[in-house]
Image (tube, helix red, strand yellow):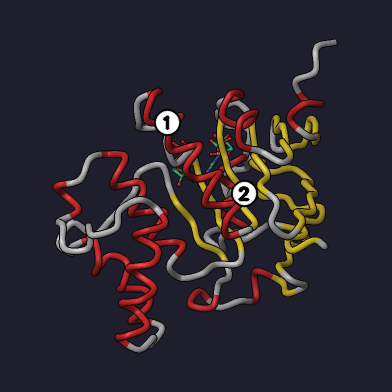
Amino acid sequence: MSVLKIKDVSKIFPNGTTAVDSFSLDVADGELVCLLGPSGSGKSTLLRMVGGFETPTSGLMTIDGEDITRVPPEKRPTGMVFQSHALWTHMNVFKNLAFGLKLRKVPADEIKRRVEGVLELVGLGGYGTRSVTQLSGGQQQRVALARSLVLEPKILLLDEPFASLDQHLRERLREEVRDIQQRLKITTLFVTHGQDEALSMADRIVVMRDGKTEQIDRPDVVYREP
Ligand code: ADP
Ligand code: ADP
């Protein structure tokens, strides 16, 4: 069953740039789809629209049948992780994760349980009282991922989350995220311009160019030798 449906969506910015051009995609429950393409092909803009950070110029996007543009920000069923983690440096790890739950009036004991559970999941059990400024780049991205996951989003949106990390760490986090994604069975859109990243993680790959779909297929088909 499709959780996310994107139908003929376009985004034309006020300066006239068409970033996304009549794009359509259905994403199944629990699927990890990679949006792959060169810089400027519209991947981020598409992801930001699904996340509710940009409004489509035309077309329709639904999550479980509900028009995304009609959902108020605090009820968005998506969680987004960006390239630069944008953690709150004046709060410790626990508070970074608890913040969104407090806003949603989740009781304190449940906050504690959920935050500690998610920190375990991303391999940062016991890190709650650390200052985020003391963490390595990889650990900070794990916190950013945990901060999204703790809100239990229906769809996880990842915009080149490992781009600022070195190759070795990138490969490790890739495996960790794929593992977490499969354990939680969380529907995920992952933006990358790295073929190897898409190949190693995706259930399906959407190759984008100039705001359009160039190809949609399973990794083994996209990369099959001609
Ligand atoms: P990608 O994520 O694939 O690098 P983007 O979605 O960031 O691509 O950008 C797609 C196109 O839209 C690019 O030409 C980019 O310059 C343009 N673009 C992105 N955001 C804006 C904006 N806020 N205003 C105008 N043009 C934009
Ligand atoms: P990315 O690395 O994700 O492609 P960019 O560096 O292209 O991101 O863009 C960073 C920010 O600047 C985004 O918020 C994007 O919407 C905005 N942006 C990108 N291109 C343009 C543009 N031509 N005009 C205005 N804003 C832009």
Point out residue 207 in the picture as x, y percentages from the top left corner: 72, 31
Work out whether 31 lies above or below 207: below
Q: Quadrant of the C terminus?
A: top right
Q: Quadrant of the N terminus?
A: bottom right
Point out residue 121 in the picture as x, y percentages from the top left corner: 42, 57
Which amino acid type is marked by label 2? Answer: Leu
Mark 1 highlights which residue?
Answer: 170
Is the residue marked 2 within 8 Å of ligand 1, measured from its CB?
no
Q: Residue at x 36, y 54 (%)?
A: 144
Q: Count residues near mark 2 (Cα–Cα under 10 Å), then give few for <14, some for 14-19, many for 20+.
A: many
Side of 48 where 84 appears, left or right = left
Q: Which mark is residue 182?
A: none
Q: Count residues near mark 1 (Cα–Cα under 10 Å), then give few for <14, some for 14-19, many for 20+.
A: some
Mark 2 highlights which residue?
Answer: 189
Disc 1 element: helix
- Proximity of marks 2 and 1: CB atoms separated by less than 8 Å: no
Work out whether 225 lies above or below 197: above
Residue 224 location, quadrant: top right
Point out residue 183 in the picture as x, y percentages from the top left corner: 57, 55
Which amino acid type is marked by label 1? Answer: Arg
Side of 78 where 202 appears, left or right = right
Q: Residue at x 70, y 33 (%)?
A: 208
